[in-house]
């Protein structure tokens, strides 16, 4: 009888030991489920033609400003990029075209919290326009339906500094010629007009944005007509490397 009771006690002890891990596991699963349930929903959809058509230039500008605010707050939208890439294979209906500098410190899509299919990005050192860039902008707006062209300059731009310093180096020299008109546009500057003066570099960079916008309008009748009809807006911005904030000019 004692042996039977001892066996029974051992069995109960073993059974109890086996149950505890299972109980812990169930609690762990509950915690995981709650964590998953509390996660923000990933954005998986890409913009459709109908959604793009319903947008106005002003609505797109507002979206860019709000996106930049999220970027500076480190609150970027969670996106399933793999899914969005697959969903965009049938076509793209972007909101805007951004003409940015080559600079790697300006992750344009992140700066405006945009995902796959949201914006076209054209890059060239000094964010100026030429025939190839103009053709790309026309494609983005006239063919693909973008509502806004944003010319984006930035703080401490190397291309702007090179233009100010009259750099002579290979194909960089004729490239910088596109930026030099902006230097002459800076009037009544009281400081040192050199690349060592950050305020002067900023002034030239902002004038370069304005000059680029004027060139786009002057050299692309297509885009000028679209703007005159209110179909698009052509605007400028200046990116602060220290804060990530875009000043809309």
Image (cartoon, grey):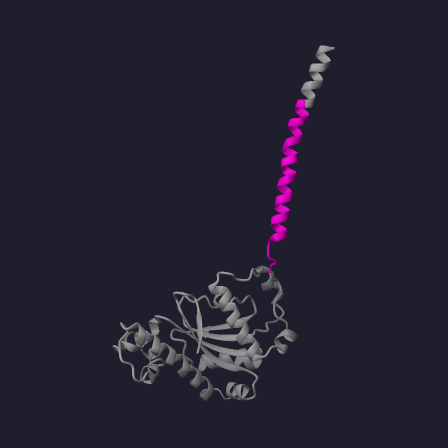
Q: Residue at x 41, y 65 (%)?
A: 243
Can residue 86 be seen by looking at this rendering? yes
Most foreground residue, 144 or 23: 23
From what the image shows, is residue 52 above or below residue 13? Answer: below
Most foreground residue, 244 or 152: 244
Question: Where, quadrant-wise, is the N terminus in this rendering?
Answer: top right
Which secondary structure dominates the residues rendered in magenta? helix
Residue 130, position as x, y percentages in the image: 42, 81
| Image side of residue 205 versus residue 122, left or right | left
Residue 214, position as x, y percentages in the image: 43, 85
Q: Residue at x 51, y 72 (%)?
A: 65
Can residue 109 be seen by looking at this rendering? no
Any magenta on residue 232? no
Residue that lies at the very extreme toward the left in this rendered image = 192
Q: Which residues are magenta?
A: 13-42
* Among the 4 quarters of the image, the one containing residue 155: bottom left
Most foreground residue, 166 or 209: 209
Most foreground residue, 29 or 183: 29
- How many marks the image carries: the answer is 0
Question: Where, quadrant-wise, is the C terminus in this rendering?
Answer: bottom left
Residue 191, position as x, y percentages in the image: 26, 77
| Image side of residue 125 versus residue 35, left or right | left
| Image side of residue 182 versus residue 119, left or right | left
Residue 114, position as x, y percentages in the image: 53, 67
From what the image shows, is residue 105 above or below residue 203? Answer: above
Any magenta on residue 36? yes
């Amino acid at each position: 009888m004692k042996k039977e009771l001892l066996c029974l006690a051992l069995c109960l002890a073993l059974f109890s030991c086996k149950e505890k891990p299972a109980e812990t596991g169930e609690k762990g699963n509950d915690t995981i489920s709650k964590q998953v349930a509390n996660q923000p929903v990933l954005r998986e959809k890409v913009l459709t033609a109908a959604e793009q058509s319903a947008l106005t230039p002003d609505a797109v500008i507002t979206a860019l400003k709000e996106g930049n605010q999220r970027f500076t707050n480190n609150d970027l939208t969670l996106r399933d990029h793999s899914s969005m890439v697959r969903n965009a294979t049938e076509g793209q209906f972007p909101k805007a075209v951004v003409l940015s500098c080559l600079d790697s410190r300006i992750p344009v899509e992140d700066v405006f919290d945009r995902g796959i299919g949201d914006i076209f990005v054209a890059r060239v050192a000094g964010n100026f326009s030429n025939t190839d860039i103009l053709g790309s902008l026309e494609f983005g707006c006239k063919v693909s339906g973008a509502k806004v062209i944003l010319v984006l300059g930035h703080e401490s731009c190397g291309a702007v500094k090179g233009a100010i310093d009259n750099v002579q180096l290979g194909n960089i020299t004729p490239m910088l010629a596109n930026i030099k008109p902006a230097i002459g546009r800076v009037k009544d500057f009281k400081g040192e007009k050199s690349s060592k003066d950050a305020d002067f570099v900023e002034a030239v960079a902002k004038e370069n944005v304005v000059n680029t916008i004027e060139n786009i309008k002057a050299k692309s009748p297509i885009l000028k007509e679209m703007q005159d009809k209110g179909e698009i807006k052509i605007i400028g911005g200046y990116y602060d490397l220290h804060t990530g904030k875009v000043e809309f000019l």
